[in-house]
Image (tube, rainbow, N blue to C red):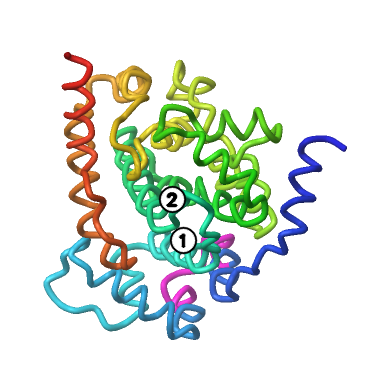
């Protein structure tokens, strides 16, 4: 049995929950570029919970419209099909993830980290001139979606890996590879394909640990670079940023004289404050900018 088959068997045995029908329909509609706001509004309006989430999202301070938007079709017209589709997709995945209560694992912190990484990947994608920066946002949000499922299925074994991170001194992916022969990135790719998510999403998710494969020529795979760079942001549970040097070196190669790390992280922190209430997430106890300054001060001593 190959390692990949072992991983597939594990996830098959986990009996992954099915995506809501509304999310499946939106993904189907997205395959035809002729479909517009009217078509995309239908499955959203058929799901009262999703309708409420979409309208709350569009009316949030994140967009800052001067009047309240009460119509789903208008909401899609104003902020774009891709934005609404990806928001609905992440909301669906968000609702399906188990909370395994596995040692130091904390689902709320995982989603805080995911939102930060999504906002960061989009900011990098926009700087690089990518038209699909919204897809980077969604893929970066979903990059760690396998972690709670693995924590639930593997119990004490996975709890040991989470504890072995030692607040960011070791990467959980390195510990996964040493212990199981695969990583949560590969697991995320398997899950994404099992849900029939777009192949581009699956590839962005499963390659988010492979920064060194793309960073020397960031123009060739800018989307993968943006998502993989986001994976080096510190976790909300960590009190220090142990991979700052690696992050800074890669960031400089990718951004090529663009905004500084501090400027980009300040934007991510600001966007997080505006976006988080839509997803009922609290603010982390320390901002990314504060973590950056703390790491820089520590390095200077």
Instruction: Residue 208 in the image: state x and y as whole percent.
Output: 51, 35
Q: Is residue 131 left or right of residue 189?
A: left
Quadrant placement of the N terminus:
top right
Question: Element type at marker 2?
Answer: helix
Residue at image position (17%, 14%) is 300
Quarter of the figure with residue 235: top left
Instruction: Name the residue at 31% across, 82% down.
Output: 71
Q: Are circles 2 and 1 on residues that touch, CB within 8 Å?
A: yes
Q: Is residue 123 left or right of residue 204?
A: left
Q: Which mark is residue 274?
A: none
Examine the image and state in which quarter residue 117 appears: top left
Magenta region: which residues? 29-41
Q: Position of residue 189 (x, y in %)?
A: 63, 45
Give the residue at x 47% y 34%: 165
Q: Nearer the viewer, residue 107 or 51?
A: 107
Please state which of residues 29 and 180 is positioned toward the viewer in this rendering: 180
Q: Residue at x 56, y 67 (%)?
A: 29
Hey, which residue is sitting farthest left in the picture? 66
Between the C-alphas of marks 2 and 1, the distance is 7 Å
Within the magenta stretch, is there residue 175?
A: no
Residue 234, compared with residue 48, is above or below; it is above
Relative depth, front residue between 2 and 24: 2
Name the residue tied to disc 1.
90
Secondary-structure class at tag 1: helix
Q: Position of residue 151 (x, y in %)?
A: 59, 51
**Left or right relative to 277: residue 34:** right
The residue where tag 2 is placed is 141
The front one of 108 and 61 is: 108
Image-quadrant location for residue 187: top right
Of mark 2 and mark 1, the one earlier in the sequence is 1
For the C terminus, the quadrant is top left
Pinpoint residue 213: horizontal percent, then vertical percent. 54, 21
């Amino acid at each position: 049995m190959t390692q990949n088959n072992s991983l597939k068997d594990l996830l098959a045995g986990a009996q992954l929950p099915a995506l809501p029908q509304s999310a499946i329909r939106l993904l189907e509609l997205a395959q035809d570029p002729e479909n517009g706001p009217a078509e995309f509004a239908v499955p959203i309006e058929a799901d009262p919970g999703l309708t409420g989430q979409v309208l709350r999202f569009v009316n949030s301070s994140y967009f800052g419209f001067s009047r309240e938007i009460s119509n789903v079709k208008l909401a899609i017209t104003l902020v774009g099909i891709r934005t609404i589709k990806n928001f609905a997709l992440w909301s669906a995945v968000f609702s399906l993830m188990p909370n395994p209560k596995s040692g130091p694992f904390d689902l709320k912190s995982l989603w805080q980290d995911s939102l930060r990484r999504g906002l960061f990947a989009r900011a990098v994608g926009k700087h690089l001139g990518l038209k699909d920066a919204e897809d980077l946002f969604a893929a970066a949000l979903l990059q760690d979606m396998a972690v709670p499922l693995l924590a639930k299925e593997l119990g004490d074994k996975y709890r040991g890996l989470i504890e072995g991170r030692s607040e960011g001194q070791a990467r959980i992916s390195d510990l996964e590879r040493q212990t199981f022969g695969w990583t949560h990135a590969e697991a995320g790719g398997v899950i994404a394909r099992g849900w029939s998510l777009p192949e581009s999403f699956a590839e962005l998710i499963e390659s988010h640990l492979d920064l060194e494969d793309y960073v020397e020529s960031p123009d060739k795979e800018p989307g993968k670079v943006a998502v993989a760079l986001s994976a080096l942001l510190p976790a909300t549970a960590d009190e220090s940023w142990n991979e700052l040097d690696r992050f800074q070196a890669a960031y400089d190669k990718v951004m090529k004289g663009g905004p500084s790390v501090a400027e980009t992280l300040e934007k991510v922190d600001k966007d997080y404050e505006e976006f988080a209430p839509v997803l009922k997430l609290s603010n982390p106890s320390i901002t990314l900018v504060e973590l950056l300054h703390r790491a820089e001060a520590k390095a200077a001593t």
